[in-house]
Image (cartoon, rainbow, N blue to C red):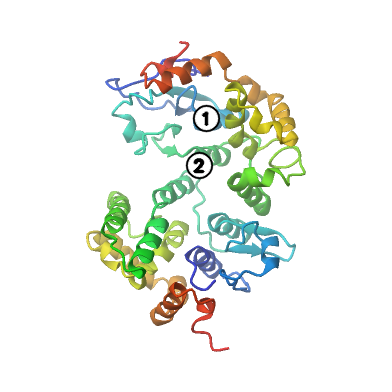
Amino acid sequence: MSGASARSLAKGSAPPGPVPEGLIRVYSMRFCPFAQRTLLVLKAKGIRHEIININLKNKPEWFFKKNPFGLVPVLENSQGQLIYESAITCEYLDEAYPGKKLLPDDPYEKACQKMVFELFSKVLTNKKTTFFGGSSLSMTDYLIWPWFERLEILELNDCVDHTPKLKLWMAAMRQDPAVSALLTDPKALRGFFNLYLQNSPEACDYGL
Amino acid sequence: MRFCPYAHRTRLVLRAKGIRHEVININLRNKPEWYYTKHPFGQIPVLENSKCQLIYESVIACEYLDDAYPGRKLYPYDPYERARQKMLLELFYKVPHLTKECLVALRCGRECADLKLALRQEFCNLEEILGYQNTIFFGGDCISMIDYLFWPWFERLDVYGIADCLNHTPALRLWTAAMKQDPTVCALLIDKNIFLGFLNLYFQNNPDAFDYGLTC
């Protein structure tokens, strides 16, 4: 989708114009796990979107009009409506767009997924099913995935050594089309983190 | 528990939607062992239905009730308006902690000017929202879910001794007045003297605090 590999917009950049009809815009950052949640849902539901990357170390002034907290992800539609907070953006997309529902329709099943999202690390040891939402992949799995992807890349695998179920889950996740389409390149992520820890404004554009 | 603000949210929604329910109060200082089979950490509120399905986390429980039961919908139908209410809830997240810290500080005879300042700042943020929207309630001109989710902490400002934190937020004061007119809020208003009696016993670590005011 357009914009995924574009340089981030920083302070002094011109604010982008309105979002064209038929498209939804996501303000993102290539290495942000919260933004990746939204991208996963956009991909999984096949929603036409454009991406504007934001330099989180040198934010454009206009970006605070999109989200007073100045964080990504933020959704903007052609009506100028803005939605932020990653879990809220994901739920909004599931409700507003047709096609495969990632959250269940049944009120109790939906509540269960939300409870799992709240307590996922505690629930994991008792979990009997392959995915967090049940026997097939759904919303909760996408919300959690970005952190586990980073565990492997940053060589923090030891965290999952004691939880074979989690290892199995990670393998199953890599089979998912949306997840595999958006896999973060390990070298790029490590390069980003190096620059990020040095507070470099170039960090967000590493590899471009 | 009769005085818990999180459980209060759920009771407001049950009442607002006219859902038949029974209440079991839990002694939070001396929890029954079986209660941990209802919630892994023994927290309230928890909903349990006749299918033995359990739902916890006050916001999740409130949304479940709105989804599962017919009649008046408390969340809007429009996905964007629903998302707006959830974003508003994010703006509120510091309020419960700050009000509790003020209460504890005052009850322990400590200064809490900094805490009150921080709370006033949070109220200013909410005031800005009401000003920008130019509506009485947070969801529009009628009361809706977000108002019920905020309410329990505002009801407690007076009995906690921090009602003056609303001094510089007129729209928020108008909102609290309008909330007190709502039949649901009204029906569940906690008597101030009973609440004070509870707080007195609670801060003396009296395990009977939770049942203060009950005659049987």
Location of residue B137 in the rendering, given as x and y in whole percent from the top left corner: 36, 59
- Mark nearer the N terminus (1 vs 2): 1
* Residue sitting nearer the eye, A147 or B206: B206
The residue most toward the top is A208
Q: Which amino acid does label 2 sit on?
A: Ile
- Is A99 positioned to the left or the right of B147 in the image? right
**Label at residue B1:** none
Is A24 placed left or right of A158 in the picture?
left
Residue A50 percent coordinates (x, y): 47, 23
- Which label number is shown at residue A33? 1
What residue is shown at x 30% (from left), y 29% (from top)? A62
**Residue shown at 72% from the left, 24% from the top:** A175
Q: Considering depth in this image, is A5 or B96 the residue closer to the camera?
A: B96
- Residue found at x 69% / y 40%: A132
Residue B76 percent location from the top left of the image? 49, 53
**Chain ID at mark 2:** A
Q: Quadrant of residue B56?
A: bottom right
Question: Front-most of A93 and A152?
Answer: A152
Front disc: 1 or 2: 1
Tag 1, which secondary structure? helix
Relative to B14, residue B55 above or below: above
The amino acid beneath tag 1 is Pro
What residue sits right under mark 2 in the picture? Answer: A88
Relative horizontal placement of residue B37, taking residue B174 as reference (left or right): right
The answer to whether residue A54 is above or below residue B111 is above
